[in-house]
Amino acid sequence: MEASVEAMGSAYSIVAYDEDRYALQNAVDAAFDEVRRLDGLLSNYKPASELSKINQLAADHPVVVSQEVFDLLSACLEYSRLSEGAFDITVGDLMKVWGFYKGSGHLPHAGEVQEALKTVGWRKVRLDPEHRTVFFTQQGVELDPGGIGKGYAVDRVVAILKRKGIHSALVTAGGSSIYGLGAPPNEKGWSIDIRNPFDESKPEAEVVLKDQSMSTSGSYEKFFTADGKVYSHIMDPRTGFPATGMISVSVIASRTLDTEAWTKPFFINGRDWASKHQPPGVRVFLCEDNKDHTCAWLQ
């Protein structure tokens, strides 16, 4: 069966196989209920969500949060540390200044970027494991789950499908984060194309996912043009400007949380950095924005 739902600003789709049609429907319904729950937990578009309450209050005093949100934020700060700040969940204000928050983007004044940068920085987020609290060290800090929320949701969906006895499913979020659970009937896994960013009619590469995830970040996903220059939504939180040098990055690993988080640092920091910091068990495919339009797997 195939079904989809809109949540967290993306379309979540499931293609699943099982001989028991009732069990299959029950599993998919439970998975989508989980996506809706996470939408209510992590959406920064919903004032009542736990994430929104953190954004509203954490600069005034430490905010007690659920263990689930605390663990997710802990993972985010670890990605920030490992990526040397290229991954940063505090880019909320920066995305607003560039018009990518509920929009397709626009060119801000330099002063606006500098002002927004004052509120950006993962070290401004303090987590207290003993009291399970989140605290911002200054006013104006805003968490944006856009760089990791889909990945977390996909992993949760896969966990529920497994718990419900489903062994063959393809879960996608926004088309950019994909998990292949098991394999479809009579196949070795789920065949997925990596898009050619220069010619959509022919894929750049093909991968087979079996109990693996793939996430892709591309400058072609959301961008605008100003004064003849293209600006993408993939922001370098250290400079306050969209990253350059890459067209797309695809990452394959066992968890979607990892694949989605790592696409941004590899895109922002480039091939040389990626070759030195590629985590064990992670595969990386990069398309560079150079005259040769180089696309290749990272060795």
Image: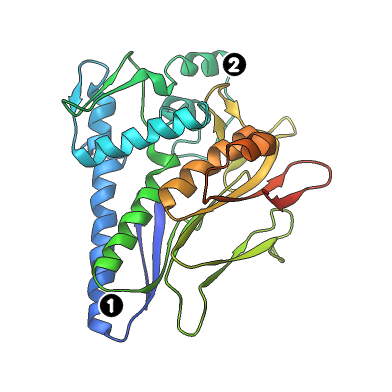
| As drawn, 65 above or below 278 | above
Q: Position of residue 77 (x, y in %)?
A: 39, 30
Which residue in the structure is indicated by mark 2?
A: 110
Q: Is residue 221 left or right of residue 157?
A: right
Question: Toward the viewer: 35 or 134?
Answer: 134
Q: Secondary structure at mark 2?
A: helix
Category of crowding for the residue at label 2, using alpha-carbon neighbours closer than 10 angstroms: few (below 14), some (14–19), many (at least 20): few
Category of crowding for the residue at label 1, using alpha-carbon neighbours closer than 10 angstroms: few (below 14), some (14–19), many (at least 20): some
| Amino acid type assigned to the residue bearing label 2 in the image | Ala
Residue in view at x 22 percent, y 30 percent: 53
Q: Is residue 53 left or right of residue 158?
A: left
Q: Quadrant of the N terminus?
A: bottom left
Quadrant of the rendered structure where residue 80 is? Answer: top left
Question: Toward the viewer: 272 or 257?
Answer: 272
Q: Which mark is residue 24?
A: 1
Q: Secondary structure at mark 1?
A: helix
